[in-house]
Image (cartoon, helix red, strand yellow):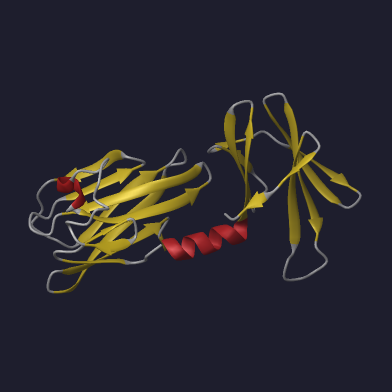
């Protein structure tokens, strides 16, 4: 992931790389007309999944278009000011996101993304310290389970009803997914740096954790 994005005409930034407008990577499903204004793409992991944010910036018209997961969220076809910011919301939890547009020199621009007021890098670092994430496939569906530092459990962007209990070696937080019994077990690692270890158990089977 390239952060921040920098554009100098006639180059454009697409899929985190700088390429020329006649590059063979500009094949469908994107049209050449759209690609010449597409300057930045970010993948953002939230509680309800990974969201793709795309930003178009016309450096002659000032046009700004923001897409979230392919859906147009903001469109401004003409703006006198080429720099500034655009704020919108992402995911089921309506997480606040802001794209900053800054001029570097001449026709070069820098694009940075903020989530909840933090740079994307800082937000992801904090998230990895305060959440645990598991993904599993059951009954033909994908489930993204997120445990927050508040001990709230979320599934696909929705907060679940849970019941906690103390056990001999730690605690267990119980909840259900359909007809499946689940719980997250918390035990001490015995090491100060590692802290508490959380493990998701579904139908008596341990589910491997993914990076948040």
In the displayed structure image, the side of residue 136 where residue 195 appears, left or right: right
Image spot of residue 37 (x, y percent) = 18, 53
Q: Quadrant of the N terminus?
A: bottom left
| Residue that appears at 36% across and 41% down | 69
| Residue that appears at 17% across and 53% down | 36
Position of 212 relative to 28 (above/below): below
Camera-side residue: 72 or 116? 72
Residue with the most extreme front position: 24
Q: Quadrant of residue 19?
A: bottom left
Image spot of residue 199 (x, y percent) = 75, 49
In the displayed structure image, the side of residue 5 where residue 172 appears, left or right: right
Camera-side residue: 204 or 153? 204
In the displayed structure image, the side of residue 169 where residue 134 appears, left or right: left
| Residue that appears at 53% across and 38% down | 157
Position of 113 relative to 104 (above/below): above
| Residue that appears at 54% across and 62% down | 126
Camera-side residue: 119 or 49? 49
Residue with the most extreme right position: 168
Image spot of residue 32 (x, y percent) = 17, 47
Image spot of residue 78 (x, y percent) = 9, 49
């Amino acid at each position: 992931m390239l952060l921040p994005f920098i554009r100098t005409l006639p180059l454009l930034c697409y899929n985190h790389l700088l390429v020329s407008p006649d590059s063979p990577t500009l094949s469908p499903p994107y049209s050449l007309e759209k690609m010449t204004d597409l300057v930045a793409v970010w993948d953002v992991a939230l509680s309800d999944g990974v969201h793709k944010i795309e930003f178009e910036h016309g450096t002659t018209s000032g046009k700004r278009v923001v897409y979230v997961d392919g859906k147009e969220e903001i469109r401004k076809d003409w703006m006198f000011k080429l720099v500034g910011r655009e704020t919108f919301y992402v995911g089921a939890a309506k997480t606040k996101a802001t794209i900053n547009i800054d001029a570097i020199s001449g026709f070069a621009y820098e694009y940075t993304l903020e989530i909840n007021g933090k740079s994307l890098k800082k937000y992801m670092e904090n998230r990895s310290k305060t959440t645990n994430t598991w993904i599993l496939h059951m009954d033909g569906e994908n489930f993204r389970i997120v445990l927050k530092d508040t001990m709230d459990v979320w599934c696909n962007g929705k907060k679940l009803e849970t019941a906690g209990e103390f056990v001999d070696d730690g605690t267990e937080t119980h909840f259900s997914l359909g007809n499946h019994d689940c719980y997250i077990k918390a035990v001490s690692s015995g090491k100060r740096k590692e802290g508490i270890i959380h493990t998701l158990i579904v139908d008596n089977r341990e589910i491997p954790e993914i990076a948040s």
